[in-house]
Image (tube, helix red, strand yellow):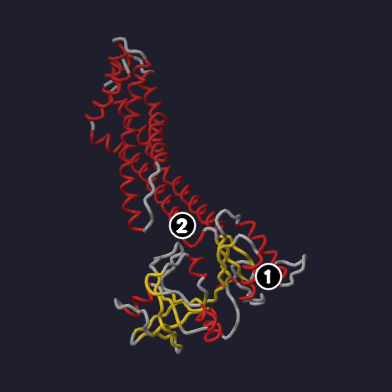
């Protein structure tokens, strides 16, 4: 019997028992759909993390006092804070930098008229906008005179604008950060939520000197943000900054750093590596459904062989070869599994498209995973259909014809 004829015979057999065939492939459908769903959503989450951090600046370094993250700000209470002079030293001594931004942060209640809103206040220079990729929606940046004199001017994010000023333009209007008066000179373009769940638009930016003089009363700089120029190795710049800071802070060769320099590329690698591992783990769990589906196919094929024993005996009696009977049942199992794989792929892609919209990640189509899922479903059909097919092929024709 030719392979095509075997395929047509398998199709007719499946159509005669549509309900049983549908239930047989249900496990394969669920398994393939789950794998496609997990991998697609995982790829979307990885793409979102990479995109969001790249917007912050994949070529950016964070220089902070303290050894790594140890609570808010990552600074140890015993570590000396940075100053504007440290940022100036980095800018003047390290080559290959496009911007250096000393920053300090605090939280304040922003007030305009009867509206008030608790928000994050960042003290910075105009370089902060460059390093963080902020763009103005309206207004202007700080002038040199305002920065040096520590004037009461500010730039506000979209959330603060919406909560305090509603639909009216805030440019030139007054607002207060608790008891301190400020004049809004610019608004920032909307960025949305970060990968860490923070509202990036809930921000007020004021001159660093204004924050130091009128809010914190110190000259401390919480973080120095360094943007590395294109084509320059961040690892090289990181090493030079570490050497410079050790020298400025008088750290001996046998002492550990009391500061840390974080490369955003390392953060991207860590986060994408985590999402990749989680995706692989969830996909492996979902893949167990494929094995369960394969066992279901084997059980149903065993029942089918038993039900069609006299048919098999007739075929063997009139001259059919064992390999032809084996091929008939094997093709039937593969067709069932492959059909289940196709339905599972369609279901998984539809579910991933809906899920991507619901959780706010991009839909990432991976043809390789789709092809692998389809081939694996076919392989499940071969693996679990072989035993029933072999049992059918090895039936004794006389005993098969006597079977009631």
Q: Check the image and report above or below for 313 versus 52.
A: above
The secondary element bearing badge 2 is classed as: helix
Tell which of 397 and 175 is nearer to you: 175
Residue at 33 percent across and 21 percent down: it is 328
Residue at 26 percent across and 27 percent down: it is 11
Q: Quadrant of the N terminus?
A: top left
Residue behind mark 2? 49
Residue behind mark 1? 258
Residue 367 placed where, x, y %? Answer: 39, 40
Tell which of 81 and 101 is nearer to you: 101
Within 10 Å of disc 2 (Cα), the crowding (few <14, some 14-19, many 20+) is many
Residue 292 placed where, x, y %? Answer: 39, 40
The secondary element bearing badge 1 is classed as: loop
Indicate left or right for 30 with 262 as reference.
left
Circle number at residue 218: none
Indicate left or right for 297 with 216 as reference.
left
């Amino acid at each position: 019997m030719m392979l095509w004829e075997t395929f047509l015979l398998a199709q007719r057999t499946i159509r005669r028992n549509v309900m049983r065939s549908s239930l047989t492939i249900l496990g394969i459908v669920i398994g393939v759909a789950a794998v496609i769903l997990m991998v697609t959503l995982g790829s979307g989450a990885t793409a979102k993390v990479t995109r969001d951090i790249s917007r912050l600046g994949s070529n950016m370094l964070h220089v902070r006092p303290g050894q790594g993250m140890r609570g808010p700000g990552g600074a140890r209470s015993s570590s000396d804070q940075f100053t504007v002079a440290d940022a100036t030293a980095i800018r003047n001594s390290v080559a290959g930098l496009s911007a250096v931004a000393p920053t300090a942060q605090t939280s304040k209640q922003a007030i305009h008229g009867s509206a008030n809103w608790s928000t994050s206040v960042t003290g910075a220079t105009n370089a902060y906008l460059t390093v963080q990729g902020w763009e103005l929606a309206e207004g202007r940046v700080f002038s040199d005179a305002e920065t040096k004199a520590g004037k009461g001017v500010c730039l506000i994010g979209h959330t603060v604008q919406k909560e305090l000023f509603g639909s009216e333009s805030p440019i030139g209007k007054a607002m207060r950060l608790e008891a301190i008066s400020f004049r809004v000179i610019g608004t920032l373009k909307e960025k949305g939520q970060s990968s860490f769940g923070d509202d990036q638009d809930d921000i007020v930016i004021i001159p660093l000197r204004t924050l130091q003089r009128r809010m914190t009363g110190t000259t401390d700089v919480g973080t120095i943000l360094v943007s590395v120029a294109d084509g320059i190795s961040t690892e090289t710049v990181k090493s030079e900054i570490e050497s410079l800071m050790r020298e400025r802070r008088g750290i001996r060769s046998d002492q550990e750093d009391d500061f840390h320099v974080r490369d955003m590329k390392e953060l991207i690698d860590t986060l994408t590596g985590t999402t990749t591992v989680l995706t692989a783990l969830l996909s492996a769990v979902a893949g167990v459904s494929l094995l369960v589906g394969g066992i279901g196919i084997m059980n149903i094929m065993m029942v089918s062989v038993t039900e069609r024993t006299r048919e098999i005996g007739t075929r063997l009696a009139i001259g059919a070869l064992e390999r032809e009977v084996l091929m008939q049942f094997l093709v039937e199992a593969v067709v069932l599994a492959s059909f289940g794989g196709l339905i599972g792929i369609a279901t998984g892609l539809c579910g991933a498209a809906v899920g991507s919209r619901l959780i706010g990640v991009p839909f990432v189509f991976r043809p390789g995973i789709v092809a692998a899922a389809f081939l694996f479903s076919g392989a499940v059909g071969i693996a679990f259909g072989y035993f029933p097919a072999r049992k059918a092929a090895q039936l004794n024709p006389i005993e098969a014809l006597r079977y009631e």
